[in-house]
Amino acid sequence: MGCTSYKILAPVTFGAGATAETGNVCVSLGSKKVLVVTEKALVNLGLVKKVTDSLEKAGLEYQIFDECVQDTPDYVVEAGGKAAKAMGADTIVGVGGGSSLDTAKAVSVLVGSGMTIEELLIPGPPKDNPKLITVMVPTTSGTGSESTQIGVVNDTTRKCKTGVGCIPSAAIVDPELTVGLPRSITVYTGLDAFSHAIEVLCSGGMDNPHSDALAYDAIERIIKWLPVAVEDINNLEARENLAIASNFAGVAFADAIVNLGHGMAHAMGTLFHIPHGVACAWSTPVVLEFMAPVCGEKYRRVAHTMGIDTTGKTGEECAKLCAAWQREFMKKLGVPDAQSYNLTKEDFVSCTDYMMNVEVMTMLGKRVPTREEVVALLEDAYEGCKSI
């Protein structure tokens, strides 16, 4: 092994009840005026109040912006930026799932950098931009966005997803916020985190001992605890383990980028508005099969975690067995099939141009696909999920 490097971008306060520390964390960062970026459903459920109670206790002025919706559209980011400017916010606290956290990141950069929304979404490699103090409070266990340097925004003009660079100042990961999360969201977010860990292991030239260790741990926790949380949505032990898994996979993702599967998932999300976790679940088996020739030995370890007998098997064979296992895992968890969204094989193949011409993540794995291989991968993904 040659020289390598690894890092963690944002300090994390973790544990049941950690939300109560949000105000103290903000004060330690120098916050005075806070815009809480979230969605209406979380306000109605009372989860946001746990955050605002902590801000009040710490003596911080705050306002709530609750217009976040799925897929982080640019017009919501722009509206959030106007709200932050109007109150003179120096801090953005994102509360919610991936879309809310990504919106919070983008609002922080939009205001902190002084850019227009058009400038913010100029295509290109994301960089760490000037930003406001940014604190992430996830309410799902999947995206890991609280520990990554990217916020994904849907550019509704160009009809593509753009990565906005924003390293959070801090994260508050409280598994109590995920207790009672509906079965479907538990499944989708858990399999999103699973896809992060699987793809980290086949990251092209960026994987390292730190990212690998976190990915293996996340995979093990998700395999063990996701079915438990699905059957008992109030099981705190399961929620704690999934929260750790999601965060670990996010930290690993920030260290060693996700790749082919997310290229596919982003295309499906942009073109057909498929929930990100569902698209990731559909994509993961074909990633395992495609990366088998170059990552087989890593996936041998994953196969052991899955309970697969690898005796006498090559690493490449182990990776393909992992793919078959994951397809069965999807079925057991009740992931929707392609027919549920009225998608055909032709629809899947229509993602090719987006993956090849727009989504750079397609090319960031240890094995880079040709156009013909992308078409074949999309066809395989369809066959694997056309009727689950």
Image (cartoon, rainbow, N blue to C red):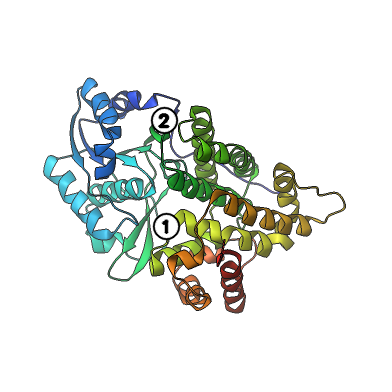
Residue under label 2: 174
Q: Is 118 or 325 nearer to us in this picture?
A: 325
Q: Give the farthest residue toward the left.
A: 86
Instruction: Identify the image quadrant of residue 116.
Output: bottom left
Q: Is 319 or 148 nearer to us in this picture?
A: 319
Q: Secondary structure at mark 1?
A: loop
Q: Give the farthest residue toward the right.
A: 312
Amino acid under label 2?
Answer: Asp
Number of other residues with Cα within 10 Å of mark 2, as a class: few under 14, some 14 to 19, many 20 or more:
many
Q: Are marks 1 and 2 in contact (CB under 8 Å)?
A: no
**Residue 206 visible somewhere in the drawing:** no
Number of other residues with Cα within 10 Å of mark 1, as a class: few under 14, some 14 to 19, many 20 or more:
some
Query: Is 82 located above or below residue 47 in the figure?
Result: below
The image position of residue 169, as x and y in percent, is 36, 37
What residue is drawn where x is 56% and y is 62%?
260
Amino acid under label 1?
Answer: Pro
The image position of residue 93, as x and y in percent, is 29, 38
Q: Give the farthest residue toward the top.
A: 57
Of badges 1 and 2, the one in the foreground is 1
What residue is drawn where x is 48% and y is 56%?
278
Left or right, 318 with respect to 41, comes to: right
The image position of residue 111, as x and y in percent, is 22, 49
Query: Is 20 located above or below residue 150 in the figure?
Result: above
The image position of residue 201, as x and y in percent, is 63, 51
Mark sitting on residue 142: none
Mark sitting on residue 275: 1
Which of the two labelled residues, at mark 1 and mark 2, occupies the earlier sequence position? 2
